[in-house]
Amino acid sequence: MAGAEVAECRYVPAGWPEGTRAIVRSARIDAKKVRTDPRSRRRRTIDPAQLALVLGGEADHAYAYSFIVANIGGDPVAIEALFRGRAQVEERIKDSKCGLALRHLPSGYGAVNRVWMWSALLALNLSGWTKGLGGADGDGRAHAKRARRKLICIPAPCRPPRSPGCPALEPGPPARPVPRQVGRNAAAVRPAGPAGERSPAG
């Protein structure tokens, strides 16, 4: 994680199993990246006093702290990276269930459900790829809801219909031409050559 520091705490409380380790990650967070939404998980990793200074405009950054308790041997930095990667996988699994196809499995047959599962995960990854190409995901962590909000939904305020029972919509504010941006970025991705080298642009 860019800008983070990882260390192992030597103190072990009485009663912890043999080999248990406590690993701490500290990361500097710019004020502009601290969301005002109280549901934000990042806010919960910032000391309340620092959070109040950042939200009040009295500080331009804060420090977020995360703790990992594990009995895994090895370098603390590698262990922190392992758990962070697992957390991102869990986010993707949550995304695949939240409003997407993995909310339920359609069959009593395992083979059918496996095909359904892999299709849902493939769609989720394609959604993430589209968000990245469209500029809606700058850090590789955009969720499925963002795709619906930024790439699919087109705002249009309602106006009185011309005839009863006929809903009418007026165009909303001009949206960013995301589809064209996706096309330009996709065209800039060149396939790898036989030795893993990029082929020359055509």
Image (tube, rainbow, N blue to C red):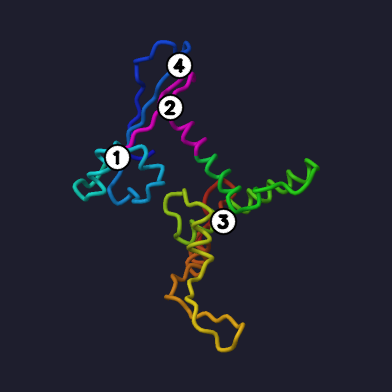
**SS class, disc 4:** loop
Amino acid, disc 3: Ser
Q: Nearer the viewer, residue 8 or 91?
A: 91
Q: Label 1 is placed on what type of residue?
A: Arg
Magenta segment boundaries in residue numbering: 63-87
- Mark toward the start of the polypeptide (1 vs 4): 4
Q: How many angstroms separate mark 2 from mark 1 (CA)?
A: 18 Å
Marks 4 and 2, Cα distance to the nearest angstrom?
Answer: 10 Å
Residue extending furthest toward the front: 164
Secondary element at image label 1 = strand
How far apart in space, not on screen, are marks 4 and 3 (Cα)?
A: 39 Å
Q: Which residue is the site of mark 4?
A: 20
Nearer the observer: mark 4 or 3; the answer is 4
Identify the residue at image location x=19%, y=47%. Answer: 58
The residues bearing labels 1 and 4 have C-alpha atoms spaced at a distance of: 27 Å
Q: Amino acid at mark 2?
A: Ile
In the figure, 202 relative to 63: above or below? Answer: below
Q: Is residue 81 magenta?
A: yes
Work out whether mark 1 precedes mark 3 in sequence or the reverse, and give the earlier one: 1
User: Do the residues bearing badges 1 and 4 touch, measured as CB atoms within 8 Å?
Assistant: no
Which residue in the protein does label 3 denote?
127
Residue drawn where x is 56% and y is 44% of the image: 94
Mark 3 element type: helix
Image point (74%, 45%), residue name = 113
Quarter of the picture containing the N terminus is: top left
Read off the residue under disc 2: 68
Quick check: 57 left or right of 2? Answer: left
